[in-house]
Amino acid sequence: MTHTPTVYVTREIPEVGLETLRERYEVVVRTEKLPPDQAEVRARLRKLDADGLVCLLSDDVDGDVLDASPDLSVVSTFSVGYDHIDLAAAAERGIAVGHTPGVLTETTADLTWALLLSCARRTVEAHAYVEAGEWEVWGPTLLTGADVHGSTLGIVGLGKIGTAVARRTAGFGMDVVYTGPNRKPGREAELGDVGVDATYVDRDRLLVDSDVVSLHVPLTQATEEWIGEAELRRMDDDAILLNTSRGGVVDTDALDTALERGWIGRAGLDVTDPEPLPAEHPLLRHAPERLVVTPHVGSASVGTRDRMAEMAAANVEAGIEGRELPHSALRDAGLK
Ligand code: DGY
């Protein structure tokens, strides 16, 4: 009798991905809303003798998890980010790791712009004002915000998402500066083709010159708390900080102080540290006047999430069949 491989899925993902997996494998989907802890994942993998694991960015996958099932050949994360997975440990054990790059670029750039416009034009605050019944009369200075057109956008990390965010400035007549470890002539050319002139500057120049600073770097040792007190103090006191990358790129306490003391104007966050951000977290006292927070929904369009599920399933299939993954995190991280 041939063995049907087993795949453990730590949370429900869009049906289109699960259907593909069910056609070939025994698929066990954990249906609880909250993520499992590591002990539960280890126990389930062990008990199922799982061949594949589909995880989310809220699952911490370390060496012990990878060792839980001797048959485990692939970990497939339903995310582009893989900072929650110990890639070196996976590479050592010969376990393939898949992720979902590229597909969420434009969707995340759209959400970044939603936060940008919300912060600049105070739309969330305005909505709360109307809802609270405070709209009694048209006012000459009522809820005045900042112009987006003609302002300067500073992109930290001109990768795929950073470039997609910058490309959208074409309709707003904005100046674009960017920073990162290296100049990116290819990205500059790509933006030049749509009439966006992106200038490479150092970190200090970007912080000083930008009306909006938008973060698009992965979370690594080099980018952890990239925005701290010193950086926030360098920014303009009207400037907007946007984070749609990873919460750990910003020092939350420093941001709290910056909003309190008026070192910057506003912040729009789709990712936070801690994440999820508890309703009683002190940072939320700045909302909605100085802060807009969304619950890590950068890639949350129906089409993109379906596509992510398909990619996650394709990575599992390749891993179990011993083929090169179509979207290998080990390859993309230079570990293979
Ligand atoms: C990712 O995929 O890494 C995003 O943060 C969520 O879609």
Image (cartoon, rainbow, N blue to C red):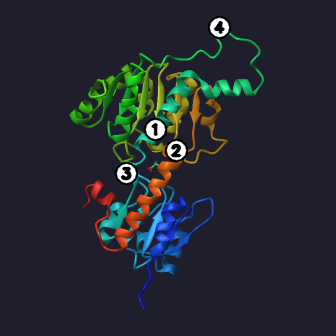
The residue to which callout 2 is attached is: 273
Q: Earlier in the sequence, mark 3 or mark 1?
A: 3
Residue 130 lies, with reference to residue 45, above or below; the image says above
Please give left or right for residue 225 compared with residue 13 in the image. Answer: left
Residue 185 lies, with reference to residue 146, above or below; the image says below
Q: CA distance from mark 4 to mark 3?
A: 46 Å
Q: Are marks 2 and 1 in contact (CB under 8 Å)?
A: yes
Q: CA distance from mark 3 to mark 1?
A: 23 Å
| Quadrant placement of the C terminus | bottom left
Return the mark for residue 140: 4
Of tags 1 and 4, the one toward the viewer is: 4
Residue 201 lies, with reference to residue 44, above or below; the image says above
Label 1 beta carbon within 8 A of ligand 1: no
Please give left or right for residue 286 compared with residue 6 in the image. Answer: right
Residue 261 point in image, percent of width and height:
55, 23
Mark 3: secondary structure: loop
The residue to which callout 1 is attached is: 250
The residue to which callout 3 is attached is: 101
